[in-house]
Structure formats: structure tokens, C-alpha cells
Image: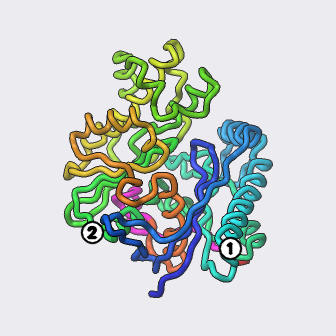
Amino acid sequence: MAMRRAIGLMSGTSLDGIDVALIESDGERVRVVKSANGLVAPLGPTGYRGYGEAEKALLREATRDAEGIRARADRPGRLAEAEDFVTRAHAEAVESFMDRNGLSPEEIDVVGFHGQTVIHRPKLGLTVQIGDGAALAKRLRIRVVSDLRANDVAQGGQGAPLVPVFHRALAEAAGFTGPLGILNIGGLANVTLIDANGGMLAFDTGPGNGPINDWMKERAGRDFDDGGDTAARGTVDEALLDNLLGHPLLLRAPPKSLDRNWFSHKLAGYLTIEDGAATLTAFTAHAVARSLAFAGERPTRWIVGGGGAKNRTLMAMLERLLKAEVTTADAIGWSSDFLEAQAFAYLALRALDGLPLTFPTTTGVAAPVTGGIVSEP
């Protein structure tokens, strides 16, 4: 199949803004650029549209209101308002991105629109990512693929993680051989384990940046722990850490996907700012390390993307606990910031071709399935 251009959009559970990325792919292979120093990067520019404080507050409130959802079409509280905002903000992000890069709608084959997850309860057959794909397609005048998790959940899968098939395509393009671990640390953390034969095992490992960000917002008025500096000045409360690591969802074998709200910073409420940040950072790192109990082969190399890759304290903890080479996606030519947006561009192309997005070893679905709703402009 011929290479096509796709734009991917991602607004994660950290609620900081919208990542935009352009890739070229045939739905199987990813076009990459290999530099003289051996770095391999997906071809295409990236962009970002941050959320303002009032916008973040709206999304936080909508996420709380989502606890009242009983059916996928329910929009209690401020959810309808938030859905309209999410759609409009994503349209603005794409329009700005295309203008900066001299692109026209006719040059883009599809937009992969993840939307904003507000509730994820796969055991109840429920996952909701707000955002109107049809309205976005009409405004952009580009075909849009949205609602990419729902079919997997309807078929008995966990609906997450969705990015492993893209991780494998990138690893193949880079010439990596297993065993390899690719870790994404957003609001939650998820891992793709690729064995020496190219087999995939993927699941959510537990908390990512979410509880740390919430802690910093409440106690220090900051959106995140910049570089992990606050955690670096603190001391881990080992008793509390042991208690946190006893969370039953961390002990459950994959397939498993988790909800951002299941890991609350409130558990560390009596600590100093520094000790709380240190303990919650250790919680994320130890949850990743404990996930290796489910691995067939222990990775000798780890690649870390997402906002957590910028947290030096977290990265140091991971290297110590995983006892392997741990590097950031940026260090090998990938993008720590835009890996998920690139993945949703790739998934949109696969959805157009009816190719599987999820697999028994990634979400627990009975057989490989495609997904997504296609909206024409």
C-alpha cells in the first residue's frame, strides 16, 4: 500500500493540552528519517495547543461529573459543555498546525482524533472519550477517525492500551530486536513488551504523572514537578509506599487497563510537599518494576516516552529498579512528547483499511479487532 499522510491528536489524562503530529505510513510501515548518528525519527512536524487555567478547570470538573455516566451517550453536569470545548480546541490545534506548516486539507488523508477520556470502566463495558468526530471533520474538511477504544471494549477487551502496534512498527523501523520495553508515562503509565520474536504484551502498569501532578497542584500551586526536583529533595515514606503498592489492580494479571481516578494523591495528604512528591514518584516507578512479574522475557532495553520522561528523579528510580538500559524516546530520535499523537495518526490509517488496532495480548480481546468511527467531511 502507498504511504499516506495522517495527523494524530492526543489530549491525555494529565489535562495539559493537545499534541498534534503528522506521520506518513501505509498502515503497516512507518516512514522514518535515519540520521548520520543513527537516530531514527518518524517523518513529520509536531505541534501543541496548551489549555488555559479555565479550560483545565472545565475538564477537571467534567471528569468528576463523568462519574455519573451510566451509558456512553450520557453527558451529566458540564460534560456537554466540555465536549463542545474539546472539539473546538482540537479544531483550533489542527488549523494552527496546518497553517504553520503550509498544509491544506487536500494534503491530509485522515485525522486520528482520540478525544478526552473522562471515564474508563471496561469491566462495565464503558469507555467515554468526549469530542465530536463528525463536527471536527466538517470544520476541518478532512476525514476523521474517532472513538477508537469503543469497539475493543464492546468485544470484551480492555480498550487500552491502543499504541502497542505503533510501538512495534517504530521498533521495526529502528531495527531494534527484543526483548524491548516501551514505556509511556502520561497521567497513567502503560507498557509495551516486545519479545525476541516480535510478540507483544501490553497493559497499564498503574499511576503515571497524574497523582504527582495533582499533589503539586494542590500543595504547591504548580502543574507538575519540574524535572522531579521536588521529589529529589524528599524522602520516600516506605510504609505508605508499601500500602500503595498493595492496590489490587496492580496485582492483577494482564490484560488490564486502569482509570486515572483510581490513583489519588490524597493518600499522601499528611506528608510534606517534598516527601509526598518523592513517595508518589516512587509509587509510579515501583508499579512499573512490579509489572515485570507478568513478562515472559525481561527487557534489556527500555525506551520511555510521555511527560514522565522529563522527570529526572523518576527516570533514575526506573533505571535502578529495572536493572536495564533506560533511555528517553528523544535520545533515540523518537518523541517523548508526541509519541501518542503519532500513534493515533497511525491507528487512524489502520482503521481506514480495517486493520486490527488491538490484540489478545494487548487488550485481552478474544481476537484481533479494528475500531474507530469514520466521519467524512
Q: Which residues are magenta?
A: 358-374
Amino acid of disc 2: Gly
From the top left corner, tell me how far across and down residue 261 is, in percent: 56, 36
From the top left corner, tell me how far across and down residue 55 is, in percent: 74, 43
Q: Is residue 373 magenta?
A: yes
**Callout 2: SS:** loop
At x 52% / y 70%, what residue is drawn? 44
At x 34% / y 71%, what residue is drawn? 173
Confirm whether residue 255 shows in the render. no
* Of residues 255 and 112, the one drawn nearer to the viewer in this rendering: 112
Residue 170 higher or lower than 377, as above or below:
above
Residue 11 higher or lower than 7, as above or below:
above
Confirm whether residue 204 shows in the render. yes
Q: Answer with left or right where residue 353 lies relative to residue 79.
A: left
Which residue is situated farthest in the front direction here? 36
What is the magenta segment's predominant secondary structure? Answer: loop
Which residue does the numbered mark 1 point to in the structure image? 375
Asked where in the image residue 246 lies, by quadrant, the reply is top left
Asked where in the image residue 92 lies, by quadrant, the reply is bottom right
At x 49% / y 78%, what residue is drawn? 354
Q: Which mark is residue 169?
A: none
Q: Quadrant of the C terminus?
A: bottom right
From the top left corner, tell me how far across and down residue 244 is, in percent: 40, 25
Amino acid of disc 1: Ser
Q: Which mark is residue 175?
A: 2
From the top left corner, tell me how far across and down residue 87 is, in percent: 73, 58
In three-dimensional space, the C-alpha distance between marks 1 and 2, rounded to whole angstroms, equals 35 Å
> Mark 1 packing: few (<14 Cα in 10 Å), some, or many (20+)?
some
Q: Answer with left or right where residue 347 lies relative to residue 35.
A: right
Q: Is residue 347 magenta?
A: no
At x 37% / y 22%, what residue is drawn? 241
Q: Which one is earlier in the sequence, the residue at label 1 or at label 2?
A: 2
